[in-house]
Image (cartoon, coloured by chain):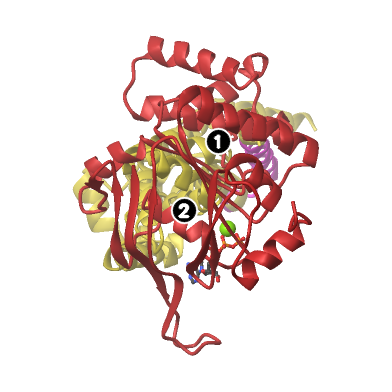
Chain colours: A red, B yellow
């Protein structure tokens, strides 16, 4: 479904910066395949390149080299119409939700449908349906500023799901939430995958979250995938020091 | 006291005409600002580095145009534009003629205010729209202008008040309007009462414009 072939992202550092110019490799050439319906995690310490890799999948970051494939179609910024169509298959949930403050909850969820040119009646029906699905039917006419963090996240999920994407890309979705609220969101995301068959790609440095949601995760460090962990095959046996430290940091090294 | 009263009452018809002229100057120049300055400001924002239409040459060009337009003191702009005003308005006196240099001053001013308001929209919100597959024009009309609308209204309010004060200057060289009245009677003829009445009217107008702008911005803002 999603295939990354030697994708890499570097930034050109300004000559006057501390590093004195040159290139900074946020993501080194990386290849990955994520199957349809899978729940895939990207974990690593801060600055490892997780968000950059996630954003390469929908080309919010343009690859410096390599290619991104969605259902055997290469994504390219050179074909804006095709890229827009592909992006509608790739819902995204951001760490800070990025809701529009001047649109109601319903207005936010309607936005991707309006952008796709869906007719008004269909938009309304779909918005009602998705909001009910995430348990926010009663908040439709509220503005985001009046919602709790957990509610905002559910709006963000509803908005991403409205156009019936095949994939949901989530960047640290629960990092701003308390554990209880985060737990509720985990349930929602699990249902997204189980009931709607949406492929999940989840970036997090929270091992418990990734364990709870994903069957498989790539461990990143220094812009590279250094190890792959499986959570569906009994005991997790990390090979690299980084993975051991990540697991230890969350106190589940010997589950 | 009764003398002063008569002077003020006698001037009222002329004051009404002057207020109408000021209104006309503002209406024309504010419309020009919306029509040309608005799109110019949006384009200025979009062409900057990291924005959806990032083009270095375009940004430098527009930025230079806006800065140049904004660097003329209004009096000088008015004088320098006399031939252009004659070409566009067919005359150089009267409120319509005065609206020409006012518009030329208003357009880059509003463009800069628009650009600044759009910068206030969090980057992530624009990225979210891009991730949904929005086109550039959809980003402008469905995201940027919606999220920045309170700031845009406040910017427009600032512009209206600046133009009210510019229009007084334009009035002195044949544009008419409230400022012109104040100078003609209050200054040249030493009729202090008229000066006071016109100044009071200008103060009241500024208050009303600012109050309306603030109220509207608050109504539109759900942050
Ligand atoms: N525009 C940019 N210019 C230069 N360097 C950048 C840019 N964007 C990101 N980086 C760098 O790339 C590296 C990877 O960033 P990224 O956001 O992908 O990390 P992350 O793993 O998501 O970290 P976190 O857990 O803190 O979110 C970081 O060192 C970051 O400073
Ligand atoms: Mg990150």
How would you rate the neighbour count of disc 1 (Cα within 10 Å): few for under 14, some for 14-19, many for 20 or more? many
Q: Give the range drawn in magenta.
A: B188-210
Q: Relative to B169, is A81 above or below?
A: above
A128 or A6: nearer the viewer: A6
* Badge 1 residue CB within 8 Å of ligand 2: no
Q: Distance between the residues labelled 1 and 2?
A: 22 Å
- The prevailing secondary structure element of the residues shown in magenta is helix
Residue B212 seen in render: no
Mark sitting on residue B130: none
Could you tell me which residue is drawn at 45 percent across and 31 percent down? A198
Provide residue B10's location: percent of width, then percent of height: 60, 27
Provide residue A54's location: percent of width, then percent of height: 47, 53
Q: Relative to A59, is B68 above or below?
A: below
Q: Can you tell which of label 1 and label 2 is closer to the viewer?
A: 2
Badges 1 and 2, same chain: yes
State which chain disc 2 sits on. Answer: A
Answer left or right for B2 relative to B170.
right
- Return the residue at label 2: A54
Q: In which quarter of the image is the N terminus of chain B?
A: top right
Provide residue B136's location: percent of width, then percent of height: 33, 44
Q: Quadrant of the C terminus of chain B?
A: top right
Q: Which of marks 1 and 2 is nearer the N terminus?
A: 2
A43 or B80: nearer the viewer: A43
B178 or A188: nearer the viewer: A188
* Badge 2 residue CB within 8 Å of ligand 1: yes
State which chain disc 1 sits on. Answer: A
Circle 1 SS class: loop
- Return the residue at label 1: A100
In which image quadrant can residue B12 be found? top right
How would you rate the neighbour count of disc 2 (Cα within 10 Å): few for under 14, some for 14-19, many for 20 or more? many
B177 or A174: nearer the viewer: A174
């Amino acid at each position: 479904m999603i295939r990354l072939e030697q994708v890499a992202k570097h930034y050109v550092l300004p000559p006057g910066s501390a590093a004195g110019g040159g290139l900074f490799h946020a993501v080194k050439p990386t290849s990955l395949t994520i199957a349809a319906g899978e729940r895939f995690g990207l974990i690593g310490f801060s600055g490892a390149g997780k968000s950059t890799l996630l954003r390469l999948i929908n080309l919010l970051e343009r690859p410096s080299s390599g290619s991104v494939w969605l259902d055997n179609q290469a994504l390219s910024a050179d074909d804006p119409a095709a890229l827009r169509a592909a992006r509608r298959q790739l819902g995204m949930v951001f760490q800070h939700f990025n809701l529009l403050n001047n649109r109601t909850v319903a207005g936010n969820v309607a936005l991707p449908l309006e952008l796709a040119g869906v007719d008004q009646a269909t938009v309304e029906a779909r918005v009602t349906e998705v909001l009910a699905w995430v348990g926010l039917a009663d908040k439709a006419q509220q503005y985001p500023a009046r919602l709790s963090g957990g509610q905002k996240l559910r709006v963000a999920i509803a908005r991403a799901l409205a156009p019936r994407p095949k994939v949901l890309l989530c960047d640290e979705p629960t990092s701003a939430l308390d554990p209880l609220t985060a737990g509720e969101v985990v349930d929602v995301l699990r249902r997204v995958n189980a009931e709607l068959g949406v492929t999940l790609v989840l970036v997090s440095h929270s091992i418990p979250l990734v364990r709870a949601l994903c069957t498989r995760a790539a461990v990143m460090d220094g812009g590279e995938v250094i190890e792959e962990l499986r959570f569906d095959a009994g005991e997790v046996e990390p090979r690299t020091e980084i993975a051991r430290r990540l697991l230890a940091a969350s106190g589940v090294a010997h589950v | 006291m009764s003398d002063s009263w008569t002077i003020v009452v006698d001037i009222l018809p002329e004051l009404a005409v002057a207020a109408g002229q000021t209104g006309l100057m503002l209406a024309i120049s504010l419309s020009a600002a919306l029509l040309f300055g608005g799109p110019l400001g949006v384009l200025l924002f979009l062409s900057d580095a990291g924005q959806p239409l990032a083009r270095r040459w375009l940004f430098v060009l527009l930025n230079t145009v806006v800065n140049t337009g904004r660097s003329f003191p209004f009096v000088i702009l008015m004088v320098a534009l006399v031939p252009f005003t004659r070409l566009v308005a067919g005359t150089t006196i009267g409120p319509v003629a005065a609206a020409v240099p006012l518009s030329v001053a208003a357009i880059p001013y509003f463009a800069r205010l628009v650009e600044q308001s759009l910068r206030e929209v969090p980057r992530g919100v624009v990225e979210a729209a891009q991730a949904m597959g929005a086109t550039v024009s959809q980003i402008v009309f469905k995201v940027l202008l919606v999220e920045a609308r309170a700031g845009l209204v406040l910017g427009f309010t600032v512009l209206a008040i600046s133009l009210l004060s510019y229009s007084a200057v334009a009035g002195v060289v044949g544009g008419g309007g409230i400022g012109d009245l104040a100078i003609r009677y209050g200054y040249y003829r030493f009729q202090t009462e008229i000066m006071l009445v016109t100044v009071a009217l200008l103060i009241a107008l500024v208050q009303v414009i600012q109050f309306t702008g603030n109220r509207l911005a608050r109504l539109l803002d759900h942050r």
